[in-house]
Amino acid sequence: MKVDRRSFLSFVIGGAAGTALTPLPWKLTDDLSIWSQNWPWTPIPPSGETTYVASTCTLCPGACGISVRKVDDRVVKIEGLGGHPVNDGGICPLGLSGPQLLYSPTRVRTPLKKVNGGWQEISWDKAIQEIAVRLKELREKGQPQSVVWVSDTDRGTVAELSKRFLTVYGSPNFIRTPSIQDSYELALYLTQGQRAMAGFDLANATYVLSFGSGIIEGWGTPPHLFRAKSAMQQRGGKISQLEGRLSKTAAKADQFIPIKPGTEGALALGLIHVILKEGIYRKDVVQNQSVGSDALKRLAGDDFAPEAVSKATGVDAKTIVDLAKAFAGAKKPLAICGRGNGRQESGNAQEFLAVHFLNALVGSINTAGGVIAVPEPDYIEWPEPEMDAVASNGMQQARMDGAGGKDFPLSRYLLNRLPEMLSAGSTSPVQALFVNSANPAYNLLDTVKVEKGLKKIPLIVSFSAFMDETAAMAHYILPNHVYLERFEDVPAAQGFPNPVIGLVKPVVRPLFNTRHTGDAVMQLAKAVGGNVAAAFGWESYEACLQESLGDKWDALKEEGYWVDAKFSPAAFETKSKKFEFANADIALLPAYTAPKAPGDDKTFPLTLIPFDTLRLGSGSIGAPPFLVKSLEETLLTKNDGLVEINPIDAQKLGLADGADAVLSTPKGIAQVKVTLSEGIMPGLVAMVRGLGHTAYDRFLAGKGVNINRLMSSAEAPGTGFEAAWGVRAQLTKA
Amino acid sequence: MDQPTNKRFGMVIDLDKCTGCGACMVACMAENNVPFREDDTNKLLSISWMRVYRLKNGKPFPLAEECFLPRPCQHCEGHHGHSPCVSVCPATATDYDMQTGIVSQIPTRCFGCRYCMAACPYHVRQFNWWDPLWPDGMERSLNPDVSVRMRGIVEKCSFCYHRYQRALDQAYTEGRRDLKEHEYQTACTQACPAGAITFGDLNNPAHAVHKLAQPDMAHEGQSRNPKAFRLLERLGTNTKVYYLSSKEWIRKAGDTAVQKA
């Protein structure tokens, strides 16, 4: 057959058309995709028996109950524990990401020792021996007080074991990381004479006046407050949010009242002024259950008349009067304060006092819908340890941070003052630093100074389960189990209005060569020997925990939590047995002044403020991959952190949405991108907290900017508390 | 087709309660083995079955208002099950289930043509441009009830269908043929700390979703609740996710394009 042009084309076109009509192309596409879908590196999760373990979350002070789903010996999911008094099944994004922390590549798998700047694996016994030798030397030199212990909590068995260790060793320097707990505890102590924790019965309030508190951004007990907020608003309750920026809380409040940040205390005093002047306070409560209301009149005198307050705060005078009337007129009003999630700064105690006075004026102290004084947990009753002469002498030395000393007699912990002390002399007053569940090298403000200070300390021991910034600077890491691998008590839920104890339970066997910090402390004590060893008679941490919890142990092991549902707050323990608006202790505090943002306003025309989001880790926990993935594109784009700025300011600076810019403050400079927002007050720039890590994995490290590097520490007068709320800043086109 | 015993699983999301915290997104990722990448900031390429959008009222400070809108797959019924994505799929990888009202997605059938992505008006479908990879050891946290999707295919929210199957299995072993309302709940519903999400059978008048959504079946499920709206209702997609809001600007925003978060 002759192949001419015509038959050739017929063959090719006909063949193509014929093939197209057969299922062949589809079959091939399908086969190709099936082949490409079966790469061996795509994991196939093995199935197995599904079980649930009830435990408690430790990733923030909220103490939510969790239900951990396991498939055989793997943790596959963490859910909220239904019926739990705190969160009743609700859970936050960080709590949900727990399995990613358990299986995180940034976990420290074995004790490590720093040798010539690098890490060397070391056995537990050897590490503890070596640290004990250093500690014994310090005792022999008569300097036991140069040992400092930093932790994010001073409650519960592990914190108590650490304090006990320090006490018998001879150091008064146990320091809790700063948070609004400091100011709230002080306010309760000063006015009610009680060492107690502040709980907030938001669910039963009818009107909540929030001075910048991130009710839905991590403040207090997050999932509990989410539920409480939904419930109170559904019943017709209202929330007014005072803030310089339309935060999520402001967006979801019934009323958003813009206020110049840092002037919240002035507004609180302004409201007191109006309430007293109009006589709209609860006269029965104020007359019968309080003393010192005359002094309060002087405190909130003419300096805090609506016009004056309006000038300071930027809230107009009529709004101030209306707000005071709305607050005093509500059936169950509740005022709360502490900016953002309240886990970084202690705040200005005078501001907290003013807000607490507001609650007292309307009878919202220790009542349903009000502020509740929740007693400190009291289940830990160990025999007094026997002290030797070195320990007794060490314990009589002044605290290194100045807390409780002559300058700050009312304060208990002032970690924020440590970097200054460290950088002052040529040799470090701190000879050994122990860090447990805290990350000061990242979280403290003015990070550069903190790093400089830490570098001077000859011995840093970290108990971190993860290679965080502080662990990276340590000389030894004695890695703790993560919370899914260990027993531990969670002695309280911060901000929850009832006493509650949660039990952390080992859901899986420890994956690595880690050890419970409670056990590590005991073993360290035994290695130091003498009275220090004698103070720890327990066989193991678990035995100690079980003994401490006593008759609650069985219930806790069964349910995962214990709650005192019938609890009613104790009577005031002041001298007058009443609520005191004024007394000798309160008089020790200087009068309220609105703290200024550090930096001169000529060079730095703007003010940088931090804000929080639940989509990033809080405190010492770096965000796991799921959280970083869930971040809004207005917070992070590629590796660039974004700053929020009002379009008015942006136009003045010639910055378009998404433009590259340089953000500088008296403390540092950062490359950023700009995101325009109508939700921020002109004159302010805002940046999220929780980014800019140098440690952790590739999913977090190097992303965005650590705002703490740009912030300046601001010591509050009278208390020494960290009261920084912002810093002067300049934004220029890159 | 429409027998009275058929279920129409649907969701009501109360935007007054939603706080935009993102727990639904993370609960979904953990439940459904959603992969993550080193840089997941380009949201057009980032896979998230549930995504929380931010709506703005467009007014200047201090009148600016914001609202958060979680967006799972809307499980469109269209007219008699002709959802936009189902009708374009050449591989029958996605299907409208008349028994449950759920739009399924079968990863192993999908060959990645992405017609469905173009057809979906809600951006609920996402393409796996990369191999899903977990850091060493983290693959231990994967859920065996949901298969890991591979590169080159499209994925989307399934209303946690595997949870329905699990609950049914459990009921059958107990000699029951029907589920109680709480037995089948999606991961996002369960996690939401604000109680903003309600899930259940829209056909069952006893279920909370039915009471909130008040669907008018004579008019393609349109809600009788004055606070309720559905996304892009004018397209006739007849979706099964209802939103509640007491604010008019938000209800209006639901019928136009969703703004950039």
Image (cartoon, coloured by chain):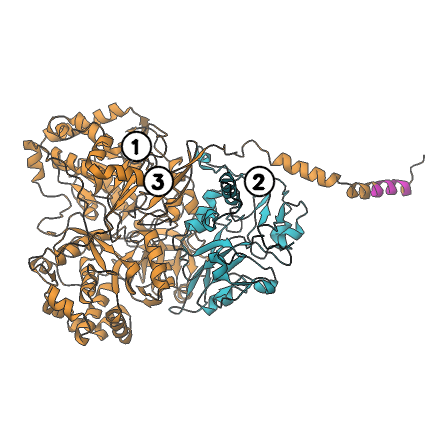
Chain colours: A orange, B cyan
Residue corresponding to mark 1 = A479
- Please check the rendered image and state whether residue A654 is part of the magenta-colored stretch, yes or no: no
Q: Name the foreground residue: A667 vs B60.
A: B60
| Badge 2: chain ID | B
Residue corresponding to mark 2 = B151
Circle 1 packing at 10 Å, graded few (<14), some (14-19), many (20+), is many
Respond whether the residues carrying marks 2 and 3 are from the same subunit: no
Secondary element type, mark 2: loop
User: Residue B153 at what x, y percent from top left?
Assistant: 59, 43
In this view, A548 is above or below A607: above
Residue name at image x 62 percent, y 52 percent? B85
Residue A414 located left or right of residue A260: left
Region in magenta: A6-14
| Badge 1: chain ID | A
Q: Name the foreground residue: B131 vs A120.
A: B131
| Badge 3: chain ID | A
Q: Earlier in the sequence, mark 1 or mark 3?
A: 3
In this view, A380 is above or below A196: above
Residue A474 located left or right of residue A7: left
- The N terminus of chain A sits in image quarter: top right
Name the amino acid type tagged 1.
Answer: Pro
| Residue A54, numbered circle | 3
